Amino acid sequence: MELLWLAISTIAIGVFGCVAWFWGSNWVLDAIYPPRGPRAGDNIRKAGQIRPWLFLGPAILFLGMYLVYPVIDSLWRSLHNSDGSRFVGMSNYVWAVGDGKFRESMLNNMLWLLVVPALSTLFGLVAAQLTDRLKWGNIGKSLIFMPMAISFVGAGVIWKFIYEYRAADETQIGLLNWIVTKFGGDPQIWLTLIPWNNFFLMIVLVWIQTGFAMVILSAALRGIPEETIEAAILDGASPLQVFFKIKVPQIMGTIAVVWTTITIVVLKVFDIVFVMTNGQWGTQVLANLMYDWMFRGTPDYGRGSAIAMVLMILVTPIMVWNIYNARKEVR
């Protein structure tokens, strides 16, 4: 109950603070540059130039505090030893290149990048096309989108139960092993089967992100002019030809945005791996490795920060390209 009241009060204070800032900054600006009198035109022009910065000011301030400063601090820490007492230059990055776990994490992240965005976008596109053609399509969309409402930790716990293992002489509580034993097979410890365990973890993120891809791509499909589809049908195009040669090319920009958005999520994947395997049995990823160095055992802030910077370097170009494409779509 205390947490509920804390959440409610935080929301109330935030909303009240925004309203107060909006009203107060407008009042002060109008007092300095009154929109009346002999200089009304000049005052309105000056106030119009300042007003957007008054509204953007708090956002810029907080973004600087919570985004820019941590990046600078992480870069500085990555150039120092474990407790930040001695400057070591690029030593932490040299260590990362030669560390087996770091190389394993990089390879696993690359594998996630190849599999998850491709499958999520493909399944989302297929789901968007099929649900738009069915009477109960909205119900189907709701069911497919529902995993998006679950946290990554919650999804990891759910799927860990699906992969749960019990000895052959015990009742299987894991859905997958229950199915296997019903068909006469032996139960498996799925999350320890290298390298297949990585794919078992990827399924969880595909399950979550398919709903996101479906919603975005469904909106894009509905925005395709009906005239082009009708013209293709009149020319004798089959449903598959209409889909692949008419619809898909026209939403390729949206597909690229969805793909790159999921790519950014994949590069930062942490919760699923942490909950289900904690990076064991060859499933380590960069974010989980960073957490291990930063917060487990004796913290090494230098190495943890170096891994964080590598992760940021990998994410930044994709994010910039995604923003560029999104703006191009708007234009």
Image (spheres, helix red, strand yellow):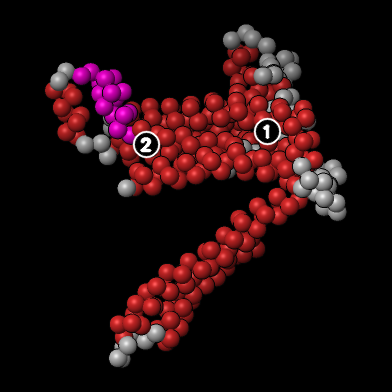
Quarter of the figure with residue 243: top left
Kind of residue sitting beneath label 2: Gly
On the picture, is 212 further left or further right than 182? left
Disc 1/disc 2 C-alpha distance (Å): 29 Å
Q: Within 10 Å of the Cα at label 1, are there few (<14), some (14-19), or many (20+) other Cα atoms?
A: many
N-terminal of the pair, mark 1 or mark 2, is 2
Most common SS among magenta residues? helix
Q: Residue furthest front?
A: 89
Front residue of 208 and 219: 219
Q: Which mark is residue 91?
A: none
Q: Position of residue 162 (x, y in %)?
A: 61, 27
**At x 36% / y 32%, what residue is drawn?**
252
Instruction: Work out which quarter of the rendered image holds the N terminus and state it.
Output: bottom right
Q: Within 10 Å of the Cα at label 2, are there few (<14), some (14-19), or many (20+) other Cα atoms?
A: some
Q: Is residue 249 magenta?
A: yes
Badge 2 element: helix
Front residue of 20 and 70: 70
- Closer to the eye: label 1 or 2: 2
The residue tagged 1 is 285
Quarter of the figure with residue 43: bottom left
Part of the protein shown in magenta: 237-251
